[in-house]
């Protein structure tokens, strides 16, 4: 059997069976499921945000419940019942509606807190409508007069909704991509560096290198982690498709989808594009260098420190990305969008802001892929020397010795 | 047959190996001895292609390549296993890397554990085992694929006499099936007991090479063990006696200047009468090691 494949399958099976990987993969679903579940549960229960409506006039009460737009409950029709429910916290309060002899509509709200500004406006609007109808009826005015009185000044606003949504799309898309890349990179560089450092620290490498070449072993490790990344991406993809289908088709989520689909769909489009390839390529490149850093550690106790150089580099790239997020045309952003280790943050930033063409993105991706291949070839070549160098010489000393150990 | 021919290796200004040559035949056990830093591990690393070196190493007439890795069983000096794996997972993984499928390895695990008296079950985690049992699991990993070339770097280190005997038996079993075995050790009694030949390194150079008996004989039978009523002073006054070491009641070790002095001493001490002990022997490997490995000379 191909020994590279043996190392690949061993790495993949061992890591994917670990709790840390399961938690990493399942956490977004758990968080989403928990949030949705909590929201659904609270929505399905009697809402304590409802208010009761009490009125001597049944038509007025019905009209309010039907037309006001305020979240109400029909349960409590009397003052006593409404007051009791308010005291128990079952409702936020109750509104008493009356019409005076002078045909003035009056409303009194009673509750532990004042009405929210939104509900206050809705109540006001309802009262205004009813009062106007009463006024017109009592004044006995003609239809023409009625129409003239109904005439309202017109304020026209041209809200450039597309622009504001577009800004949000860019903002959200970049943040999702940047933090997704950062978190995935941090996780996988940590996994890889610690795995390699632990193996080197336990000195099992001599046994392994008496069974296969350093290059085959190194490539097997990288392919194993690549399979993990693809597994995670596939699970997220399938989960995302299922989640999206649920949100689109669920009656409970219908209003949410109606409100946010114009934002969600372009964000998803930005993520499920060439930007995803940049993210996957970045994970691979950082993982290769994490393995390299892991090979520079000589003791098992230092395994956790092994990934630090790569994690700091990743943090630097993220920080620069966040700082320069609002300046996608900056020359620094343009340059960094072609520099491996940084391009996975900066080219997506330019693409999202429509300041980079597709050929530019492909060029950057090709540079990234060439760097990955060259890194694998070079590190695979020196890997044996690095892994067998076990003297305590510190990071740079180990690097120097490893490079010269032939 | 493993053939190491004129290999040299330099680390910076340090010459770790200097024109080292030796052969180990099929079914032969060779002991590689020398002080710390003499070049034993560097020799092993060169055989395993961990290092680039000058000279040539061949196995069955061909330079060792990646294809020959499956034929090798190697136990490094520093004990090393993956602590999070179970015994079965560890053995199976390393055997797979030697091209032995898991389906072949798994049925062999329990018998090998019994053979080495490993205290534990195949599904026990490595990190739950005692140090001694971990060492035995590593020995199983080294031998379970029936390697043709077995390289053991200080295999007896840390083993108690009972477990050392188990290992000796495993090495002898491998020899019986024709494996080529090379191991390093600081304990000369183990070398003397099971090795067919030995190579002693000093500062990267071969200072002794041959069968155990030949190596000992080349220093002459200058050790004379004697049980007699003679006094220490009387023995010391005999011609050809360099030094007398009392070993117990009426028992002595005489260091001779020349092995040829033996018959005259025999005649003088026995006077034609029976004596309980008169044994003229070459120096032990331990004596040779203590003197030769350090650059001194056997007295």
Image (spheres, coloured by chain):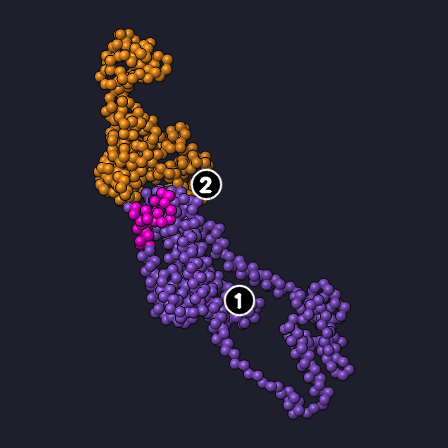
Chain colours: A purple, B orange
Indicate the position of residue B277 as horizontal and vertical percent values.
Answer: 31, 13
Q: Quadrant of residue A134?
A: bottom right
On residue B127, the disc is 2
Pick the residue in front: B105 or A158: A158
Pick the residue in front: A26 or A337: A337
Q: Does the magenta stretch include residue A393?
A: yes
Marked residue chain, label 1: A
Question: Label 1: few (<14), some or many (≥20) within 10 Å?
Answer: some
Examine the rendered structure and indicate whether residue A27 appears above or below residue B55. below
Which residue is under mark 1?
A: A247
On residue A239, the disc is none
Q: Quadrant of residue A153?
A: bottom right
Spatial separation of the CA atoms under disc 1 and disc 2? 47 Å
Examine the rendered structure and indicate whether residue A371 appears above or below residue B262. below
Pick the residue in front: A160 or A319: A319
Question: Label 2: few (<14), some or many (≥20) within 10 Å?
Answer: some
Indicate the position of residue A208 as horizontal and vertical percent values.
Answer: 35, 44
Q: The magenta stretch spans which residues?
A: A376-405
How many marks the image carries: the answer is 2
Foreground disc of the pair 1, 2: 2
Residue plotted at (64% across, 87% down): A150
Residue lying farthest right?
Answer: A101
| Kind of element beneath mark 1 | helix
């Amino acid at each position: 059997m191909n020994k590279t494949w043996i190392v690949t399958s061993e790495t993949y099976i061992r890591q994917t069976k670990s709790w840390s990987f399961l938690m990493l993969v399942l956490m977004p679903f758990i968080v989403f499921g928990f949030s949705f579940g909590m929201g659904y549960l609270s929505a399905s229960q009697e809402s304590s945000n409802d208010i009761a409506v009490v009125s001597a006039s049944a038509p007025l009460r019905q009209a309010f419940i039907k037309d006001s737009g305020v979240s109400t409950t029909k349960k409590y029709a009397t003052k006593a019942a409404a007051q009791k429910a308010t005291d128990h916290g079952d409702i936020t309060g109750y509104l008493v509606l009356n019409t005076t002899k002078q045909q003035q509509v009056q409303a009194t709200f009673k509750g532990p807190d004042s009405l929210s500004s939104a509900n206050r406006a809705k109540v006001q609007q309802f009262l205004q409508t009813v009062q106007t109808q009463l006024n017109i009826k009592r004044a006995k005015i003609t239809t023409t007069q009625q129409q003239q009185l109904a005439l309202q000044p017109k304020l026209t606003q041209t809200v450039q909704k597309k622009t504001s949504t577009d800004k949000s799309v860019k903002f959200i898309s970049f943040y999702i991509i940047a933090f997704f890349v950062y978190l995935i990179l941090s996780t996988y560089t940590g996994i890889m560096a610690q795995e390699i450092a632990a193996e080197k620290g336990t000195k099992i490498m001599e046994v392994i290198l008496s069974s296969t070449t350093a290059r085959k072993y190194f490539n097997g490790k990288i392919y194993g982690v690549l399979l993990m990344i693809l597994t995670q991406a596939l699970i997220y993809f399938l989960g995302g498709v299922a989640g999206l289908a649920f949100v689109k088709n669920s009656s409970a989520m219908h209003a949410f989808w109606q409100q946010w689909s114009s934002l969600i769909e372009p964000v998803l489009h930005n993520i499920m594009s060439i930007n995803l390839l940049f993210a996957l390529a970045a994970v691979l490149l950082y993982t290769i260098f994490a393995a390299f850093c892991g090979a520079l550690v000589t003791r098992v106790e230092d395994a956790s420190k092994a990934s630090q150089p790569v994690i700091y580099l990743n943090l630097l790239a993220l920080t620069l990305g966040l700082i320069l997020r609002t300046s996608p045309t900056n020359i620094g952003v343009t340059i960094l969008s072609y520099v491996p280790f940084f391009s996975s943050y900066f080219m997506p930033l330019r693409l999202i802001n429509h300041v980079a063409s597709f050929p530019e993105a492909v060029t950057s991706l090709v540079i990234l892929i060439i760097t990955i291949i060259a890194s694998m070839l070079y590190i695979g070549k020196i890997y044996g020397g690095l892994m067998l160098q076990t003297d305590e010489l510190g990071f740079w000393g180990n690097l120097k010795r490893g490079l010269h150990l032939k | 047959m493993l053939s190491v021919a004129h290999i040299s290796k330099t680390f910076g200004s340090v010459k770790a190996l200097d024109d080292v040559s030796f052969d180990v035949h099929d079914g032969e056990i060779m002991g590689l001895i020398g002080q710390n830093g003499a070049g034993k591990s560097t020799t092993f690393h060169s055989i395993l292609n961990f290092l680039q070196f000058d000279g040539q190493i061949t196995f069955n007439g061909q330079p060792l390549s990646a294809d020959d890795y499956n034929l090798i069983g190697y136990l490094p000096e520093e004990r090393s296993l993956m602590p999070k794996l179970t015994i079965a997972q560890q053995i199976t993984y390393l055997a797979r890397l030697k091209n032995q499928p898991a389906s072949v390895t798994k049925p062999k695990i329990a018998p090998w554990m019994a053979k080495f008296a490993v205290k534990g079950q195949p599904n026990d985690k490595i990190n739950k085992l005692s140090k001694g049992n971990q060492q035995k699991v590593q020995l199983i990993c080294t031998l379970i694929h029936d390697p043709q070339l077995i390289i053991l770097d200080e295999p007896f280190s840390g083993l108690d006499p009972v477990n050392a005997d188990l290992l000796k038996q495993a090495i002898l079993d491998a020899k019986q099936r024709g494996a080529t075995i090379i191991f390093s050790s600081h304990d000369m009694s183990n070398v003397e007991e099971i090795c067919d030949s030995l190579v002693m390194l000093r500062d990267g150079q071969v200072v002794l090479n041959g069968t155990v008996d030949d190596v000992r004989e080349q220093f002459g039978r200058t050790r004379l063990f004697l049980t007699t009523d003679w006094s220490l002073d009387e023995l010391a006054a005999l011609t050809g006696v360099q030094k007398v070491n009392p070993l117990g009641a009426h028992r002595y070790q005489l260091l001779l200047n020349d092995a040829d002095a033996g018959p005259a001493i025999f005649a003088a001490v026995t006077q034609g009468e029976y004596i309980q002990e008169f044994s003229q022997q070459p120096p032990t490997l331990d004596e040779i090691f203590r003197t030769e490995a350090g650059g001194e000379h056997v007295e």
